[in-house]
Amino acid sequence: MSYQNIKSQSSEGICTITIDRPSKLNALNQETIKELHNAFKAAEENKKVKVIILTGSGEKAFVAGADISEFADFSVAQGEQLAAKGQAQLFDYVAHLSTPVIAAINGFALGGGLELAMSAHFRIASDNAKMGLPEVSLGVIPGYGGTQRLPQLVGKGRAMELIMTAGMIGANQALQYGLVNHVTPLDELIDFAEELARKIMRNSSVAIAAAISAINAGFEEGENGYDTEITQFGKCFGTADFKEGTSAFLEKRKPKFPGK
Ligand code: COA
């Protein structure tokens, strides 16, 4: 598939999706959101892809937010529609993929950019990264899940402060907050993400998908995470990966998971 605003490249089980509008600090316009959806969908459907790494091109920005020029003159109905469509097409979509998604934050992750990183299953950042949800400085609020995912990750008080002040935090403070799991020098960020991806790939992809579903369930309205865990746990017993994982352990060898 060919894209105008992103790049997607797969090799040895890792699909790297790079948002590529550096002249606009990789801001998310509608076309980019659509292309990202298509790239994530293609990666999820490709059985060879075991981990997805999401990053931004250039050395300055992961994503500097939703493209402000596209919604500056929107009405109430259009604003609501923008948030609903974006959440369904990209942000919720990514959060619920069964293929693990690592966001490698390589610079500014602001507004929709931080919301996209928070939709990924976890985040790492380069030491020059800066993160924030500055929407209230524009007279609007985060609309791509930021009011929900930021408090889940850093706690309600910190989220309230970050959103109300429209402030930015650096990579080390984000690490201290638990917003990112690791901080690396910029030129080591992708290697580090790939190293994590390779560790993940050693394990059963079916069990990982089940774990993502159970973890997500705990944060869904009307779902009981413990119940989902029980169901998903049981389902694992019917998989070829479970047979292989337990046999390999008992036979004192490394497992070769069939991924089903
Ligand atoms: N939407 C649209 N365009 C954006 C953008 C966004 N969210 N963020 C940056 N850009 C564009 C700028 O308009 C500029 O384009 P131009 O060269 O055609 O004028 C280009 O990207 C470079 O940005 P610039 O502001 O010149 O870079 P800077 O280094 O001076 O500042 C930021 C960097 C990130 C601090 C600044 O771009 C910024 O505050 N961006 C908006 C962040 C935001 O509020 N995001 C939430 C949106 S809901």
Image (spheres, rainbow, N blue to C red):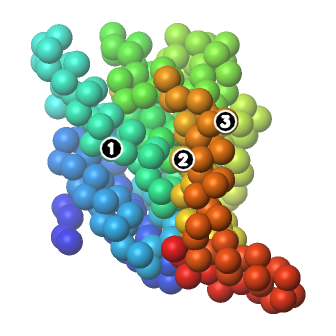
Which tag is nearer the camera, tag 2 or tag 1?
Answer: 2
Can you tell me which quadrant of the image ligand 1 is in?
top left
Is disc 3 placed on a helix, strand or loop? helix
Q: Is mark 1 within 8 Å of ligand 1?
A: no
User: Which of pointers 3 and 1 lies earlier in the amino acid sequence?
Assistant: 1
Residue at 52 percent across and 66 percent down: it is 51
Quarter of the figure with residue 175:
top right
The N terminus lies in quadrant: bottom left
Q: Residue visible at 66% across and 72% down?
A: 242
Tell which circle, 2 or 1, labels the residue nearer the N-terminal end: 1
**Secondary element at image label 1:** helix
> Residue sitting at 43 percent across and 41 percent down?
116
Q: Nearer the viewer, mark 2 or mark 3?
A: 3
Residue 24 placement: quadrant: top left
Q: Which residue is mark 2?
A: 213
**Horizontally, is 234 left or right of 54 in the view?**
right
Residue holding disc 3: 226
**Mark sitting on residue 137:** none
Q: Which mark is residue 90?
A: 1
Question: What type is the residue that disc 1 sits on?
Answer: Leu
Of callouts 2 and 3, the N-terminal one: 2
